[in-house]
C-alpha cells in the first residue's frame, strides 16, 4: 500500500530515515515516496489494460511539478480545473492530448489558453458554458472538443462536501436534460462533441456507485447514437477512496473488473481521473511536538503543523493516523493533537490515543499526500512548508519552504 515502514524503532520512507529528512529540511514537511506513486499508478493503469484508456491524474489532489512529471513519465495524463493547473501540467511535460478540463467556472481567458494548448477536451458543466466555449473557439478560428458533464443523481455514500453527482449538486447537467443539450451542442459551429463525462464524488469506498452511474451513462450513450451523435470518449471521473483508518476501499482491479465488461464493446476510450487513490497514501506530513498541555478535561499535544498546512481534519472532520517517527517507551495518552493557529478548529486529531511524545519528538501524519499541500494556505501569515520526494536511498526537496519575504511578494 505504501513505502513508509519502521526499521527497528525508526520510521523510514523507502530507505531514508524520516528523522534525517526532518533534521536537514526542517518541520513541518511533506514527504512523498516515488516508489509508492509509481506502484499506485501502475495498479490503476493495469486495471483497465484490456480496453483503450487514459489515466488522467486529478491535479487538484497534488499539483507539485515533480509528481506531475512522474506520472507523465509513466504515460499518464491529467484532469485539470483551472488555468493554473493547465500551466503546471504543461510545464511538467504532460501531453496536451491527455489533458481534460473540468470545473464549473471556466473563464474566457482559461478557455482560450486551453484551446491554444490543444487539450484533448473540455468537460462542459452548463449550457451557458458551452455557448462561451463555442464563442471563444470561433474567435480563435478553432474547434473545441467537448464532453458534457452529466449528473446521474447517484449517491456516492461519502462526505456531503465531496459528493458531486446528486440532483442538488452544483456540478454537471441533469441526465434528464442531457440528450437535448447534446443535440444543441452538435449544431454549434465551433464545437466537436467527442465524449460523455460524469464524476459522482470523492473518497468512495464501494464499487456499486460507480457501476450504477455507468449504467445511466451507457443508456445516454445509446440514446446519443440513435440520434446520430457518436461518442469517442467515456470519462468516468475519479473518486476511488483510500484507507485512512478503518475503511476497506476496493482495489482498482475490482473497479476494472466491474466496469470493463460494461464498455469493452462500445469502441470508446475510457478516461479515468484518479487523484486521492494515486497520491493519498504516498505522502505524509511530518510535524514536531512543541508542548504538552493538560487542561481540566483534555490533554493537548501542541505541534508545529496546523490547519493551514493540513485542513482536512478541520474541514471534513477527516481521520489521519498519527504515529511516532521514533518509537518511545510504549506509554500512551489520549489527547487532541493541535497546531499553533489561533482557531479552535485547528486540530489534526481529537481524543486520539497516541504513544506519549515529549517536546522535540516528531510525529508523522499519515495518508496526507492528497489534498494536503494543495489546500494549504498562509493563514496567520504562516509560511507554506517544504515538500520532499524520496527515491530509494536519496531524497530531493521538490518545493522549498517559503521565506518571510515570500509572504509579502507582490504586496505594496
Image (tube, grey):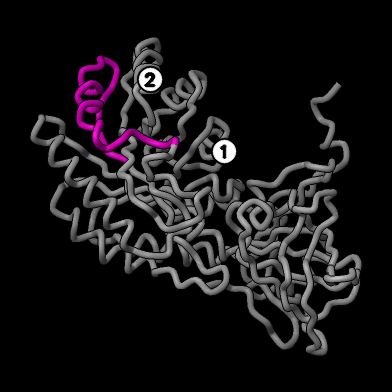
Residue 103, percent across and down?
46, 34
Residue 127, percent across and down?
34, 23
Residue 92, image quadrant: top right
Image quadrant occupied by the C terminus: top right
Q: Earlier in the sequence, mark 2 or mark 1?
A: 1
Q: Nearer the viewer, residue 251 or 175?
A: 175
Compared to 52, does 381 lie above or below? above
Residue 251 lies left or right of residue 410; in this view the side is: left
Residue 238, percent across and down?
41, 51
Q: Is residue 171 magenta?
A: yes
Q: Mark 1 = which residue?
A: 88
Name the residue rendered at 83%, 25% in the picture: 411
Q: Mark 2 = which residue?
A: 128
Residue 140, image quadrant: top left
Q: Is residue 192 magenta?
A: yes
User: Which circle, 2 or 1, is nearer the viewer?
Assistant: 2
Residue 76 lies left or right of residue 235; in this view the side is: right
The answer to whether residue 77 is seen in the rendering is: yes
Amino acid at each position: 500500500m505504501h513505502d513508509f515502514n519502521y526499521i527497528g524503532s525508526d520510521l523510514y520512507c523507502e530507505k531514508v530515515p524520516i528523522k534525517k529528512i526532518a533534521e536537514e529540511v526542517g518541520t513541518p514537511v511533506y514527504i512523498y515516496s516515488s516508489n509508492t506513486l509509481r506502484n499506485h499508478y501502475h495498479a490503476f493503469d493495469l486495471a483497465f489494460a484490456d480496453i483503450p484508456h487514459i489515466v488522467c491524474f486529478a491535479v487538484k489532489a497534488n499539483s507539485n511539478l515533480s509528481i506531475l512529471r512522474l506520472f507523465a513519465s509513466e504515460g499518464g495524463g491529467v484532469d485539470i480545473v483551472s488555468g493554473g493547473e493547465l500551466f503546471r501540467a504543461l510545464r511538467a511535460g504532460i501531453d496536451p492530448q491527455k489533458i481534460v478540463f473540468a470545473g464549473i467556472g471556466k473563464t474566457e481567458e482559461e478557455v482560450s489558453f486551453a484551446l491554444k494548448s490543444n487539450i484533448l477536451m473540455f468537460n462542459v458543466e452548463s449550457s451557458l458554458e458551452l455557448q462561451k466555449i463555442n464563442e471563444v473557439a470561433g474567435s480563435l478560428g478553432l474547434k473545441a472538443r467537448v464532453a458534457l458533464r452529466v449528473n446521474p443523481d447517484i449517491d456516492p455514500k461519502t462526505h456531503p462536501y465531496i459528493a458531486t453527482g446528486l440532483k442538488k449538486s452544483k456540478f454537471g447537467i441533469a441526465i434528464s436534460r442531457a440528450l437535448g443539450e447534446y443535440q444543441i451542442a452538435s449544431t454549434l459551429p465551433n464545437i466537436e462533441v467527442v465524449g460523455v463525462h460524469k464524476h459522482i464524488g470523492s473518497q468512495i469506498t464501494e464499487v456499486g456507485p460507480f457501476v450504477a452511474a455507468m449504467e445511466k451513462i451507457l443508456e445516454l450513450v445509446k440514446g446519443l447514437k440513435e440520434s446520430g451523435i457518436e461518442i469517442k470518449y467515456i470519462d468516468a471521473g475519479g473518486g476511488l477512496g483510500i484507507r485512512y483508518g478503518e475503511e476497506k476501499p476496493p482495489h482498482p482491479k475490482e473497479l476494472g473488473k466491474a466496469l470493463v465488461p460494461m464498455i469493452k464493446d462500445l469502441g470508446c476510450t475510457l478516461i479515468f481521473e484518479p487523484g486521492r487513490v494515486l497520491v493519498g497514501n504516498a505522502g505524509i506530513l511530518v510535524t514536531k511536538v512543541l508542548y504538552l498541555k493538560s487542561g481540566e478535561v483534555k490533554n493537548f499535544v501542541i505541534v508545529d503543523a496546523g490547519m493551514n498546512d493540513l485542513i482536512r481534519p478541520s474541514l471534513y472532520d477527516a481521520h489521519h493516523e498519527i504515529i511516532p517517527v521514533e518509537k518511545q517507551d510504549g506509554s500512551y495518552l489520549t489527547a487532541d493533537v493541535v497546531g499553533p493557529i489561533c482557531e479552535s478548529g485547528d486540530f489534526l486529531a481529537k481524543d486520539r490515543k497516541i504513544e506519549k511524545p515529549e517536546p522535540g519528538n516528531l510525529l508523522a501524519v499519515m495518508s496526507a499526500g492528497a489534498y494536503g499541500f494543495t489546500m494549504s494556505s498562509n493563514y496567520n501569515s504562516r509560511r507554506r512548508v517544504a515538500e520532499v520526494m524520496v527515491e530509494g536511498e536519496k531524497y530531493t526537496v521538490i518545493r522549498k519552504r517559503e521565506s518571510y519575504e515570500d509572504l509579502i511578494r507582490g504586496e505594496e
